[in-house]
Amino acid sequence: MNNATIVQIVSVLGCVGLISASSLLVPRINQTRNDLNMVGTEEVVENTPPEYVFAIQALGAFRSLITDIAFMRAERFKEQGRYYDAMQLHTWICKLQPRFQTVWEYSAWNMAWNISVTTFTPEERWNWVYSGAKLLRDQGLRYNPRGLNMYKQLAWIFVNKMGETIDDYHWAYKSNWAWRMHLVLGAPPDPELDDLDGDVKPMDIDDPLLQAARRASEMVDAKRRAEAEREGWRYIEREVADVSTGVMHSDEFLAAKQAAYDFIKRVDDAPDSLATLYEQFPESKPLVARMRAAGINIPPDDERVTEEMHFAEDGLAWSFFYPYRRVIEPITFRKSIEKESATPAPEFATVPVETLRELLGYPDMTPAADAVVRYLQRRVLVDVYKLDPAQMVYVVQQFGPVDWRLCSSHSLYWVTQALIKGGETVHDFQNDRTNTSRLLFFSLRNLFQRNKFVFEPLPEDIHRSYIDFGIDVNFIESLQSAFLSYGRYLDPRPTEDTQGEGVGDIYRVGHINFLTEGIITLYLLGREDEAEYYLSYLRETYGRNPDGSVRENYAKNLADYVRDNLEDILGTQRAAFETVAAVLDNAYEQLTDGRIRQYNKTVEKAKEFHEMYMQDVREDLGDRRKMPPFRDLQIDRLNVKLASLGLTANLVVRKARLWARAPLNMKQYVYDERIEQFQYECDQLGFDVAKAFPEPPGMAQFRKDHPERARQERERTAETTVQPSFE
């Protein structure tokens, strides 16, 4: 046997040995592939375009090459304006590679962000943006239930593309989404407006999000601890702030959360099938039969309701939910001020409202009738919108009284799903999780700014529905709790100087800025105990020098801290006047929304700032630095709010809401000055000025008693150019 033969034999034996040894790693490799969500589909050609089936079967592993070719063709279609062809190709690409998360993310991004902006009508924009969200929600996550970045992409569409104002057609996105949720759930309860009473029940729960955050931090800590041992540097053990010492849990917050919890828990507790419904409520079976006979298309248990079925002419949207909203909700304010039209508005309900009212026995609904309503709500949420009512309950329990008609509520829903369910990815695990977790804080911040939500749908032109937002201070507690609960765990590298204090280094500045904003807001709303609580937390956590002394900015009392920070925000020139004006403007926003108690408290704060300033300048010999009397400021700010030119129906409706609730004596001062503008705006938009802006009682006597005021106002208006306000 020569040397060459020996080498060949040894090589073969070595190859066999290496193959045998490597086979021992196959279970571990497969487990890693599963952990990384890289397990392919067994049914390769299922639902694949016919022209691709043969190629896939013949080429097998070359499926990725076919996917690349399809991507290039889809891009050409997009450049040629053949958007529907491009969307169809993207759908096929996803089916070619259903377990490859990137193709889903790219296709959804392309629809929602790239193709959508090449269209020029609200309907087209909405269709493309929503198609991107649906692609991920309805299909992508079905194949990749642990796809962290897919959840993130879906949440980003809701919070940024639809929830923010970066797109010219953002009102269309907000209106269309609010309409979908409004049909199913309607407006949530508001303890402040609805005067809800009752004991607040504790909501201590096992928090799966916190558990997931802890697991993530443990992985990072183990990795960094090993690096420290290997490289010889000291690793700092992670410490977490005690949430119980940083969140107040006010009575207002607990009451609002309890009301929202009870609202969505009724849907979660509803039967999940007709069989269960009939078993629990035998009277519901003949009721369902009568509803079907009346034209309400209640599907059987074995039929899944798609969104296309839901909004079909005989679907549940129009045969049940729309007339149900008409049964239980009063006429909208917008409808109440419209002129009588010779052409009635189109009727979308395929089942007459009175028929449904009789079927349900409203307002004295039986438990069986109520159970049917909750069953249908649950079924549409699960089948059509892929929302788990139990997870919706968890979101309310953990974060507060979300309004499910808001886009940011759904970004919060999907980002919590991401952080709970999402596993590792082929990218850097902690970076993916940290970037995703930022959406948690973005969503909560948006709810703080907008969760007081007014929505009056216009079904015949839904993207022009009336929408308005207001600050919801309940989410100050929610966001503070989220910062303390999750911030340090989600921060991959907490630094030494922040150990045990507040949140991790990544979220530190955002936490401080948010607390400052929250303190100002709470103080202006008259919730001084809460404002003082968070100022004390801010002072003790972030407001001390290395020697333990309190920094100058945090050593002030609450009133001075708020006033000084407001002046910093508004600028130094005329800061006192602008502070009072800004507080009064905020009060009128609250009055417009019907929040009378908050309005009265905010006016008192404005008066307090006015008196503090006037006390400081009382020794001035002249009047140069003095402000007008507070009552005159109130009237002037009301006049300014009403003077904004109403170029859209929403602006005029909002002004009419303010007019309906404004104090009589203030309306008398501004009516004659504004009536011609009101008349012009109403004529342009089809409103009845006598209904929208009725003349205040007693105007004849007021004109006799205040002739000089009326003349001065006319002269002042003639010299002032009112800049139009656009939305």
Image: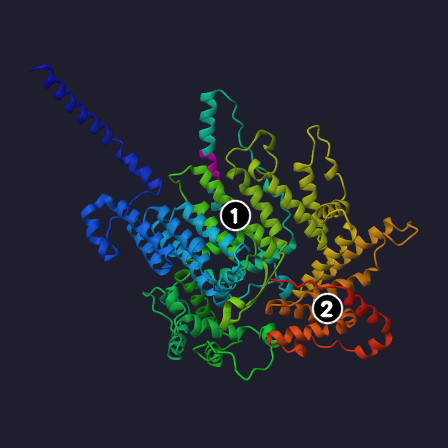
Q: Nearer the viewer, residue 408 or 383?
A: 408
Q: Position of residue 67 (x, y in %)?
A: 29, 48
User: Tags 2 and 1 in contact by the CB under 8 Å rule?
Assistant: no
Which image quarter: residue 39? top left
Tell me the tag on residue 563: none
- Magenta stretch contains residue 214: yes
Residue under the image location 70 percent in, 31 percent down: 545
Q: Is residue 85 visible?
A: yes
Q: Which residues are magenta?
A: 213-219
The dominant secondary structure in magenta is helix
- Magenta stretch contains residue 335: no
Asked whether, in this view, residue 164 is left or right of residue 22, the answer is right
Tell me the tag on residue 440: 1
Asked whether, in this view, residue 333 is left or right of residue 639, the answer is left
Q: Amino acid at mark 1?
A: Leu
Tell me the tag on residue 662: 2
Asked whether, in this view, residue 350 is left or right of residue 554, the answer is left
State the residue lying farthest toward the left.
1
Label 2: few (<14), some (14–19) or many (≥20) C-alpha neighbours in 10 Å = some
Label 1: few (<14), some (14–19) or many (≥20) C-alpha neighbours in 10 Å = many
Residue under the image location 61 percent in, 35 percent down: 501
Assign a secondary structure to mark 1.
helix
Which image quarter: residue 553? top right
